[in-house]
Image (cartoon, helix red, strand yellow):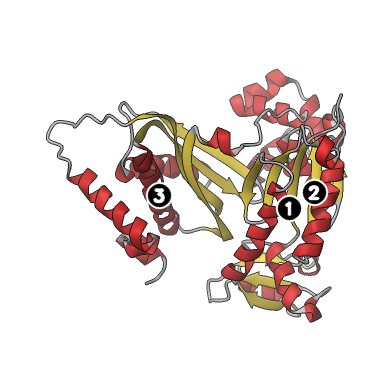
Amino acid sequence: MGSPSVLHVDLDAFFVAMEVLRRPELAGKPVVVGFTGPRGVVSTASYEARAFGVHSALPMARARRLCPQATCLPVDFPYYAEASERFHAILRDYTPACERAGTDEAYLDVAGCERLFGDGEAIARAIRARVRAEIGIAASAGVAANKLVAKVASDAAKPDGLCVVPAGGEAAFLAPLPVRDLPMVGPRLEARLAELGLRAIGEVAAWPAAALRARFGRMGEELRERALGRFDAPVLTERAAARSVSRETTFGEDEPGRSRLRAVLRAQAEQVARDLARDGRAARTVVLKLRFPPFQTLTRSHTPARQVALADDIFAAGADLFERLWREEGRRPVRLIGVGVANLMPRARQLRLGETLEADRLAETVGSLRDRFGDGAVRRAAEMTAEGR
């Protein structure tokens, strides 16, 4: 088998690392970055703070009790965003097949880049060196044959490390790791697997497929495939993304609030509708994406009876998918939310009985104002409320 060519690169404790960069005296000390109000939660904790049990989404008050000597700092999104863009620009220097997975992480497919930059391991080393030299912080990387194993490998490499899983060695690499290290396994699924005596990924891989299917349905089949290191989702390139339109938001802190999540979803639906309008297109399918900590990403889709183009219709379908999926997951805090449309086609909307074009005209007016004066020129009440304005 050839050299593995899929990379997952992740900035270590990104927000904390950026704070230490401008306050070097904090290096090696427990540091917590988060929202410091009475209901604030931890966004990122240094590894020194994590040793005391502090982690993301933990209430700040609880973090202070666990680690009273920690330095607690407020989130500074503009400062982090600039470094994030520099990070992603470095990645794109090595391949156009670069899929952003958040402000601080991405997947790359470097197959075909060997003559220019070397194999996957050499490229990962070069990227880590450039991040250190050009931004001043550490990045960990995993190199494997697919995205799932590369993600687990980069987690295993932390902090400031590199883990390469040879092609064909995926199952052996995963086998001794706890099931919770496998993307898609959250606390509830971990507990259900423990009831069967399955605590290591290799134990799940060795369990009879029929038994997993009987216990967990289709999810059991997918779970076993992942435990064996089998995962065929490609790294999404810009060309592939052109077959769909989507927007997603990664929260600096895991977001627990329903009203806030729905407000973000509404704003995303507006942006997707604007992109469709610019290209004169509509869609047949609405897709919702939710990511729960640490890295459980779930998607759901719905194909209405008629094509979708307006923000109200995209939001209605997306919100319905959100409510059902979020309820299924116990309304846990969300790390990322996104909505998109697929199966694009030329726009040719047929009016329903009694429907007028007022909604279309309103959407065009709002879109025109935002194009001229920016997204903040016109906002819905839900968005304003979510920001506390």
Quarter occupied by the N terminus: top right
Residue shown at the point (61%, 37%) measured from the top left: 237
The answer to whether the residues at label 2 and label 1 have Cβ atoms under 8 Å apart is: yes
User: What is the crowding at mark 3: few (fewer than 14 residues within 10 Å), some, or many (at least 20)?
Assistant: many
Residue drawn where x is 30% and y is 28% of the image: 306
Please name whichever residue, 297 or 307, is drawn nearer the observer in this view of the structure.
307
Q: Position of residue 339 (x, y in %)?
A: 46, 43
Q: Which residue is mark 1?
A: 10
Q: In the rendered view of the protein, which quadrant contains the C terminus?
A: bottom left
| Callout 1: SS | strand
- The residue pinned by badge 3 equals 271
The first of marks 2 and 1 along the sequence is 1
What crowding class fits label 2: few (fewer than 14 Cα within 10 Å), some (14-19), or many (20 or more)? many
- Please indicate, yes or no, whether residue 133 appears anywhere in the rendered image: yes
115 and 157: which is toward the camera: 115
Left or right relative to 34: residue 7: right
Q: In this rendered view, identify the residue nearer to me: 389 or 326.
A: 389
Q: Nearer the viewer, residue 274 or 15?
A: 274
The Cα atoms of the two marked residues, 2 and 1, are separated by: 6 Å
Name the image quarter holding residue 277: top left
Residue 222 percent location from the top left of the image = 66, 28
Q: Residue furthest left?
A: 354
Q: Residue at x 68, y 66 (%)?
A: 15
Give the labeled residue for mark 2.
Answer: 141
